[in-house]
Each structure stands twice: as structure tokens, then as C-alpha cells.
Image: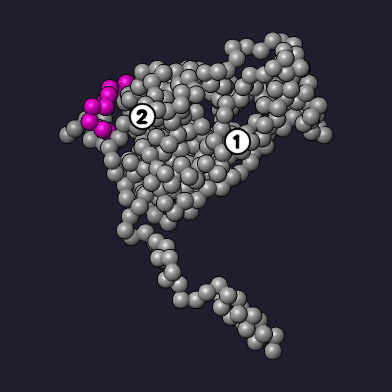
Amino acid sequence: MLRPWLRWCRWLRPGTARVLKENFGFRELASSVPPSGSTSPGALNIFDRGLKRKQKNWAALQPEPTRFDYLREEVGSQIADRVYDIARDFPLALDVGCGRGYIAQHLNKETIGKFFQTDIAENALKNSLETEIPTFSVLADEEFLPFQENTFDLVVSSLSLHWVNDLPRALEQIHYILKPDGVFVGAMFGGDTLYELRCSLQLAETEREGGFSPHVSPFTAVNDLGHLLGRAGFNTLTVDTDEIQVNYPGMFELMEDLQGMGESNCSWNRKALLHRDTMLAAAAVYREMYRNSDGSVPATYQIYHMIGWKYHDSQARPAERGSATVSFGELGKLNLTSQGKDSQ
């Protein structure tokens, strides 16, 4: 009988690193992380992926990591709800950028057969949350997924893709590894995320230092997301937005929580540090502009939810243009006629 980790190596792309790092029950760790700083040709190199890996590894090793899990827990449960809305089972599923497994814990073995989890941070994989589903962990970058074509019935991703340098390529890879009629269910931060923090820092830095640097990473616009999904090959698209507002005692508590989530800025053009006076001024601006009646300050997280399907002949398709037998004008007349009969 083959050893457990060898049984699933057939799903990895040829030539991919398949080094077994650790074996803990159903959780097994293989590695496929590119060298630090590498990116696909032609992609904008906005984020320091090596630094992001260090940030996430540091966050996963904190004494109380669950203290900072509230946002990922909420979005993970929302993605699980969307999976349950699809009336089918998924024998093989993948979570891209899983963190500590915030989606898997909300799924059950009646819906998911086997669940692969990938993340760039090995400490997050080693300290993943418990789940009843047979789970396999693969150390891999979201930009370089090490799986073969037509492998998974379902791919999910929660609050991870906003740190990817080449989002079009990442979506194309997700489409590549999905089976025909497979579905991608994902969520990522939107453009209005942390607008209160961004505005406060910019105003304070401009006033104290005569200019400002980006301290909150750039995000994708919602109108671009549908285009990128379509360009990657997905059809029957659904994209919607949600906002989660969390109240904090002050700006410094918000920044502490962002660090604990592994969500500190990792843009290459970030400023190394802010002067103490600038930080105090930003906290005062934040409180003055956005303070709640109870003295707390809000932070807004905009979430883009997306669903896309890989094409299959069995899927419903729109009729050919010009094939309609009834015009919209005639439909309006039928509606008026039915209303007249009802009034009689």
C-alpha cells in the first residue's frame, strides 16, 4: 500500500517540489513556494511576497492567534454558506491561501470528500483549525499553484488574493486546475477597505511632513473583478459586495489587530516608519472625523464575493441573438391585459 502522501502526489504538476515537511494525522505538508521576489513575466511587482510570508508566519505563532481571527472567521463562514447553496457534492476541493483553515471548519464531510489547503506560510498550515474533513496541506504560493489541469471540483479562497502581484494569472491558474463544470467561490478585500485609516494617515502625514506615502495597500476595483474572471475563462459569473464594520477603541488598536491578522502593508513602495508625532496626529484625526457616540472608532472592510464556473456542455447557455419569439413590448401588453382581467 502506498504511503498517504504519495497517493495524492499524482495531482501535483510534474516537476513540482514534493518535499514532505511534516506528518500530523490527516494533515500533511508539501512544498511548492518559488524563490523570494519571483513573479510571472510581465506582472507588476507591487507586493513583497517574501515579507508577506514572514508577516503571516509571525501572526500564526502568536500566543493567542484566535484573538485576531474574527474577520477571517466571518468571511470564511460566508463562503461556506455559498458552497452549501450549490446543490451538489464536491469529492475534491482546494482552498487557495487558506491561512489557518477558516473555510474548512465550516464545511462538512457530507459536502466535501477531500480538502486541500494551500498557503505561503508554513506556520499557518501547521497550526490550522480542526475540521471533520480529510485535509491535506500544501505549502504553495497563490501565484504558482502546483496542481495539474482538471483536478478539483471546487476551489475556494478567502481574503488572500488581494496580496497577489499577478491577479489575472492567479485566476487563470484556478480556472486551469478546476474540472469542467467546477466552481470557484472566493472573497477578497475591496477598494473601500480601511478608507478611514487611509484618509487619517494621509491627512496627518501631509500636515506634519509635507506629503504622504501609501500606508494601506492598493485594492482591486469591483468593476475590474468581473472582467478579470471572464478573461480567465470563467462563465456564469456572480460578483457582489458586502461591508463589515468593526469598532475599535482607537487607531492603534486597529493597527495592532491588522498586524495580528498578518495584514500589515507589504508594498515595495511603503514607507519604513512613521514619526511618532505623525502617528499621534493620525490617531487624533481618525477620532475627530469618524468617532462613534460611545467613543470607539469604526473600521470598514469591504468584501468582494465572487462565483465563477468552468465551462461544460451540460451548462445552461444563453440563446443566440435574434432567436427571441416575443418582444419586450409584447410582454408589457400581456402584463397590462392580465391586470385588466384581474380588475374585472
Q: What secondary structure is found at the residue carrying circle 2?
A: loop
Quarter of the picture containing the C terminus is bottom right
> Which residue is depicted at the point 66% across and 12% down?
274
Quarter of the picture containing the N terminus is top left
Q: Mark 2: which amino acid?
A: Phe
Q: What secondary structure is found at the residue carrying circle 1?
A: loop
Relative image position of residue 48 (x, y in whole percent) = 48, 19
Left or right of 181? Residue 259 is right
Relative image position of residue 85 (x, y in whole percent) = 48, 53
Please tell me the numbered disc located at residue 144: 2
Left or right of 295? Residue 243 is left
Q: Is residue 62 visible?
A: no
Residues packed near mark 1 inside 10 Å, few (<14), some (14 to 19) or many (20 plus): some
Q: Which range is magenta?
A: 12-24
Tag nearer the camera, 1 or 2: 1
- Towards the viewer: 166 or 123: 166
Left or right of 335? Residue 148 is left
What secondary structure is the magenta-colored segment mainly? loop
- Towards the viewer: 51 or 19: 51
Considering only vertical position in the picture, is 191 above or below 310?
Answer: above
Q: Mark 1: which amino acid?
A: Gly
Please tell me the numbered disc located at residue 240: none
Considering only vertical position in the picture, is 277 above or below 70?
Answer: above
Left or right of 272? Residue 54 is left
Considering only vertical position in the picture, is 10 above or below 343?
Answer: above
Q: Which residue is mark 1?
A: 191
